[in-house]
Amino acid sequence: MPPGPLPDALQLTFPMTTPDSAVFPTHIIAVPPTGARRRHALFAVHADWVQLHCATPPPLPPAPFIELGYRSAALPVVVCALPSPETFHALRTFLYNKDVDEVSDYLTPLNRMWATSFRLADMQAAMIHGVWRNACFLGMIEPEIYKAISEAWKEVYAVRQDFIRRGSG
């Protein structure tokens, strides 16, 4: 999508291989650009799913009616100024697959490269904080996500404390 003002709706075409029983997305969440990013980040979502798992989702207009057999729909675009746009995909992924291990791996990757320097550990802490800020902003009501955030924070905090103790922070 070219830079500039956002349209009220975006036409989405679904693959012909999609079964008729598929539940198509109902809205496009547009996260405003930050930093060097000049375009909105766009995420297709299902209103019911977002409203089921978030206490304070952005206001969503009525979803379009998609007739059985149609493979295209104009989905309403909803701007949502998240506190940490760059980490939203972790929460969106969790909303859909409920795989807390995947979120944990995102928050504290197993390769632990982030644990090799204080600066990288700080960057990992900022990412964890971003996921937490987004979860709070959206009012996510899933205890598993907050447990994963808490465990990741403990791990990064311990690494940072170790750097400080060794005098390499």
Image (cartoon, rainbow, N blue to C red):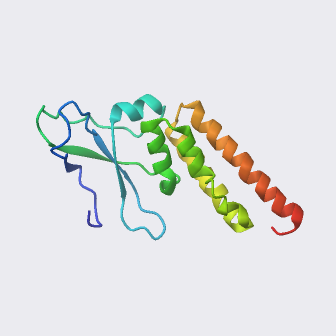
Q: Position of residue 21 (x, y in %)?
A: 21, 30
3 up-or-down from 110: above or below: below
| Quadrant containing the C terminus in the rendered view | bottom right
Q: Nearer the viewer, residue 66 or 168?
A: 168
The image quadrant that residue 103 belongs to is top right
Query: Would residue 129 be found to the left or right of residue 102 on screen?
Result: right
Q: Is residue 32 left or right of residue 84?
A: left
Q: Position of residue 78 (x, y in %)?
A: 33, 46
Q: Residue at x 51, y 38 (%)?
A: 99
Look at 46% across and 50% down and name the residue there.
89
Identity of the residue drawn at 12% across and 32% down: 67
Total labels: the figure holds 0
Q: Quadrant of residue 37 in the image?
A: bottom left
Residue 161 as seen in the image, left or right of residue 61: right
**Looking at the picture, how far across and down is residue 40, in whole percent?**
36, 59
Q: Is residue 3 above or below residue 32?
A: below
Q: Is residue 75 above or below residue 20?
A: below
Q: Find residue 51 and report its image quarter.
A: top left
Can residue 136 be seen here? The reply is no
Regarding residue 112, the answer to whether it shows in the image is: yes
Q: Position of residue 108 (x, y in %)?
A: 63, 52
Looking at the picture, tell me which residue is in the foreground, 146 or 99: 99
> Going 19% across and 35% down the picture, which residue do you hit?
19
Which quarter shows the N terminus?
bottom left
